[in-house]
Amino acid sequence: MTQLVLFVIFGAITLAAAIAVVTARNLFHAVLWLLLAFFGVAGLYVLLEAPFFAAAQLFIYMGAIGVLIIYALMLTRGVMRQQVPLVNDQWALVAVLAVALLAVLSWLFLQHTWPTVDQAVGPDSLRTLGEALVDPGRYGFPFEVASVLLVMALIGAVTIVRER
Amino acid sequence: MGTFDTSQLLAILPQILLVVLALIVLAADLGTPRGKKRSLGIVTAVGLLIVLIVTLAWPETTEPVFGGALRVDGVGKAFQAIFLLSGLLVALISMDFRPLRQDGAYYAMLLFSVLGMSLMAAAEDLVMLYVAIEIAGISAYVLVGYMREDALSAEAGVKYLLFGAFSSTVMVYGLSLLYGIAGGTGYGRVAAVLLQTPFQLAMVAFLLVLVGFGFKVAMVPMHFWGPDTYQGAPTPITAFISVASKAAGFAVLARALHFLFPALNNDWPALLVAISMVTITLGNLLAVPQRNIKRMLAYSSIAQAGYVLIGITAGGVAGITAVIFYLLVYAVTNIGAFSIVSMVASHIDSDDIQDYAALSRRSPALALAMMVALLSLAGVPPSGGFVGKLFLFAAGIKAGLVPLVVVAVLNVIVALYYYLNVVKVMYTVRSEHEEDAIAVPAPSRLVLVLSVTGVLLLGILAAPCYNVMSNWVTGWFS
């Protein structure tokens, strides 16, 4: 019961903050709402008994990524004061499509019995995760390739922004 | 912990070599003085040639490696060869594209993109697939916006990034649904669980994933980014994304339809037939009024994607072999055409079709090569494009897709009009610059020779090439 209450609370925080992100007129405010949405997701991770993900969510998303976006905003000329229109003239059509998509997906998801794990997560979930990430028979290879992705993204970002 | 068998590393030797090559190019950039950076293109091209030879010489396996993350089978190998060849040709034409201030990072991004695509072609795991798509995608965003000082290139980069990020978000949502349904990320496991899953749920997941694949392929309705991105991107990169990116999308689509969604085998063909019809028709009709040659080739490449979808929908050995054959022809043809666009733009700083007036008098060889490329794109015999279309249409008819093939054939006639229009401008319209020959640097000359001989040889020696490819494909169906 407590779990359900907590789920509703964190879910509501995430959703409300996410709506605020897309409706905020000021880009800087949107980022602050985004941080709150990240926090809500961290709470959901705790409920899923994934404490490592919750911590990573707090440190990496709320900490690193949030700060990074704020820095990027502060370094961009004029963006802090600018009030851009939030919708264009196709908003009504898009809204109908989005609501229809939501209805279809919700209907489908409620009909399906989703598989659940038959045992609780062990006390050593971090170890399990770590082993899965380095085990060449599981996610070891995608994990290594992800490091190539990061190097490439870093080089690409530097290439785009540096003075030539 | 599973034990690690080092022989698995041999299966990804070409990919390892690509990463090493990218690092070599970046390191060589430090020791290369400004103004000599052009030579890095040669390093890239030679390196890619070596990787291409290694890839082709390597025996393909049907055994998955790294716990099922990859399977470098015949189909994967064929697609990898197409990406490597495209990368090689694009590196060569980049060397003398004047508006580009090239350096090591440019060629390294090109190599990373090829790496991502070659992993896409062999990925059989949702996580692996996503990482591979992002490697190929992000490096392509950087390359499209590489000429940052040029407003069109910057705009093209931003548009490509936004569309790419959006479609990849939708795709990841679909992938997460698949994981939620199956509780695993390997294609085999997901496919098995999908067979027991209600049709609607599997279909929704398929549609969401298709958005991501469709973006790469530029099929309707995920084609909107195409023309602006093609026009603004550095011309060699336009060639690269129009050929390699598209082929990578088809590689992923073909593998997913075959190994991930067998549960929907009776349902997706109707959908793809509809998409294919609309893509071919819309691409061709919108290509007709274009005045900018890059935009025209953009719409033409949308239409070409529609033709390839015929082979994908037909499936089977005939369908998939036709797809691979056509994409190889399309690679040499389209890169050949774009290499001429790139040389002309370097010389006269324009991409307007009317500025191709009297190209036959300015540079007869260029005009001839352009004509060969355009006729092959249109599908005129004895070019490779003709035989490729023949294989696709034959596979379509064999699979009972007669209405689709009829629509495609009618469209070939529309396409002939706008391809021949460029030929007409090159050969019959006079211009006041007829004495001013367009410079053809050595690397681009090599690309032209390879492209023209490739188009003709693939047309004349189609049967042996087809047989080799069909041997690679049979592994999927035995």
Image (spheres, grey):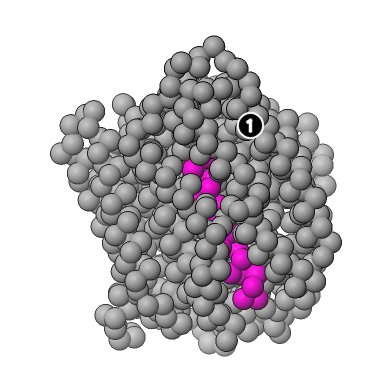
Secondary structure mainly formed by the magenta segment? helix
Quadrant location, the C terminus of chain B? bottom right
Q: Residue at x 56, y 43 (%)?
A: B372
Q: Residues within 10 Å of mark 1 (few under 14, many from 20)?
A: many
Kindly identify which chain the residue marked by label 1 belongs to. Answer: B
Q: Is residue A25 above or below residue A31?
A: above
Q: Residue at x 33, y 44 (%)?
A: B107
* Quadrant in which residue B312 is drawn: bottom right
Image: magenta residue range: B316-338
| Magenta-drawn stretch contains B324 | yes
* Quadrant in which residue B357 is drawn: top right
Residue B229, percent from left and from top:
56, 37
Quadrant location, the N terminus of chain B? bottom left
Query: Which type of secondary structure does the marked residue at label 1 adopt?
Result: helix
Left or right placement of residue B379 versus residue A156 in this view: right
Type of the residue with mark 1: Val
Left or right placement of residue A105 versus residue B429 in this view: right
Residue B396, percent from left and from top:
73, 67
Q: Is residue B371 above or below residue B165?
A: above
Residue B132 appearing in the image: no
Q: Is residue B398 above or below residue B357?
A: below
Q: Nearer the viewer, residue B425 or B329?
A: B425
Q: Residue at x 49, y 73 (%)?
A: B468
| Magenta-drawn stretch contains B396 | no
Q: Which residue is mark 1?
A: B422
Residue furthest top in the image: B432
Left or right placement of residue A56 versus residue B167 in this view: left
Q: Residue at x 76, y 42 (%)?
A: B414
